[in-house]
Image (cartoon, rainbow, N blue to C red):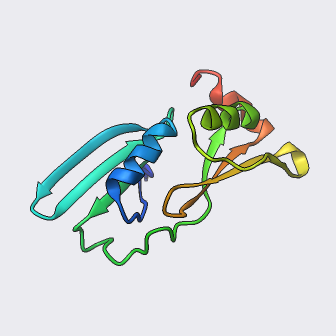
Amino acid sequence: MKMLFELVPVPVADIDRAKEFYVKAGFSVDVDVEPAEGVRVCQLTPPGSACSITLTSGLPQVADAVPGSLRGLHLVVADAASAREELARRGVPVGEIEEHPQGVKYVPFSDPDGNTWVLQEMPWRAGDFASAE
């Protein structure tokens, strides 16, 4: 059996504000549609990722998700310092680099609603980025 993890709902209070933030962070807009009255689906993908996020309104399946309640989504990067610098250059408020055992580095940041993200560099994953960058 093969399963591809493709979409994470991110609960936000204002889709337009969140969309602007994620575009500033380098995510591409794949879809932004209103398929029915009162329903909006905005799907964005981080650079090089096979998994996207969706910002929605009017969908009962995710209507009870509290804006800002998502914690610790990880974006694996080849170089935490370069990725941090790029986000900062784009105007995204980012934390400092935190280095942990085995050379793992983390850089925390949050969207305007308080959903938390982490850039994560793992030295043994460097080969994953050879053809991606």
Q: Residue at x 46, y 46 (%)?
A: 21
Q: Residue at x 43, y 60 (%)?
A: 10
Residue 16 percent coordinates (x, y): 33, 51
Question: Can you tell which quarter of the image residue 126 is in?
Answer: top right
In this rendering, the answer to whether 114 lies above or below 104 is below
Q: Residue at x 49, y 63 (%)?
A: 113
Residue 12 percent coordinates (x, y): 40, 63
Asked whether the viewer can see residue 2, the reply is: no
In this rendering, the answer to whether 120 lies above or below 82 is below
Q: Farthest residue to the left: give it.
A: 37
Question: Can you tell which quarter of the image residue 116 is in?
Answer: bottom right
Residue 114 percent coordinates (x, y): 54, 64
Residue 100 percent coordinates (x, y): 87, 52
Q: Residue at x 10, y 59 (%)?
A: 36
Asked whether the viewer can see residue 85, the reply is: yes
Image quarter of the C terminus: top right
In this rendering, the answer to whether 100 lies above or below 80 is below
Q: Is residue 94 left or right of residue 104?
A: left
37 or 30, nearer to the observer: 37
